[in-house]
Image (cartoon, rainbow, N blue to C red):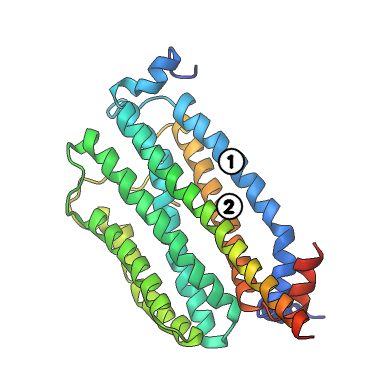
Amino acid sequence: MGEFESFQAFIEMGGHGLYVWLAYAVGAVVIGGNIWWVGRIRKLAEQRLRKYVRRQELEG
Amino acid sequence: MSFKAKFKRWFHSWASPKWFFEKSERWLPWLGVPALSLLAIGLVWGLIFAPEDYQQGNSFRIIYLHVPAAILSQSIFMMMAVAGAINLIWRIKLADMAAKHCAPIGASFAFIALATGAIWGKPTWGTWWVWDARLTSMLILLFLYLGVIALYSAIDNRETAGRSTAILSLVGLVNIPIIKYSVELWNTLHQPATFKLTEKPSMPAEMWVPLLIMVIGFYLFFGWILFKRMRAEVIEREFKAKWLQKKLIEN
């Protein structure tokens, strides 16, 4: 597999596995969090708009 | 129509949230799809196919996350300051929205750069952290971002919030050249920049090409998520507008 002899060697990263995977885990969590957050603010904003429209319709 | 008039019209169209909301819907896939592809290619290449560093071994693979995040966090700060200045001078709402949403995204990338740097420092320098110029100025960048976020949310009046944070980010720009030249001006553990405009990278192409791919992928991802955030912001601010209600409720 590329530069590595086996999948095992890829995970171990020549003894630096902990550091490499910890770094990428931090990146994944922060970027994933950003994607989750934008979905949330979009949903809340749309809910507010829908609520406003419904109230306008009720008031006629 | 002359070029100048065309440019003026294009510039003014940015003042309209409606124009942005309609156009950006079409732009999103042109940012999101290449971002995802480049990040996938860059990650596989960097983690599996790039050769290991003869001094640092495989811990050097952290570079494919660390450097793009660090570059992007500084670019986003500059963009935030420029957007803030545009808001200060021309009172363009969209510029205020962009500046507001640059802050949390930029803070995220500054955090990634600092955290991955600390993790990389442990096996390379034998320590998680040193108070040297590069690391300290990057920490200040993160604090500036947090300051902008805190200031924006502390002021109820949207216009005042936008103008105050614009000034804070313009002042904070001073930190950007300090970060850039910190590795050259002061003695530091940190290695010098990988990419320079005037020189060829000192590492082999199998190492720097995936890095360049990751950098471009990160920029595209930033564009994608910034537009997603700004679109949510348009809905939040313009929920009373008929055109928006029509657009969102019909779909």
In front here: B19 or B229?
Answer: B229
Pinpoint residue A10: horizontal percent, then vertical percent: 41, 20
Rendered position, B123 above or below B9: above
The residue carrying pointer 1 sits among few (fewer than 14), some (14 to 19) or many (20 or more) residues within 10 Å by Cα, namely: many
Where on the picture, by quarter, is residue B251? bottom right
The image shows residue A35 at horizontal and vertical percentages of 54, 52
Q: Is residue B70 left or right of residue B119?
A: right
Q: Position of residue A5 (x, y in %)?
A: 43, 12
Please state the chain letter of the residue tagged with numbered disc 1 in the rendered image: B
Which is nearer the eye, B19 or B58? B19
B81 relative position to A12: left or right: right
Closer to us: B148 or B88: B148
What kind of residue is marked 1?
Answer: Leu
Please name the residue that numbered disc 1 is placed on. B38
Q: CA distance from mark 1 to mark 2?
A: 9 Å
Residue A60 is drawn in which quadrant? Answer: bottom right
**Residue placed at 64% from the left, 52% from the top?**
B31
Circle 2: residue type:
Leu
In the displayed structure, does residue B151 sit left or right of residue B129?
right
Q: Chain of mark 2?
A: B
Secondary element under disc 1, as helix, strand or loop, is helix
Residue picked out by circle 2: B220
Looking at the figure, which quarter contains the N terminus of chain B? bottom right
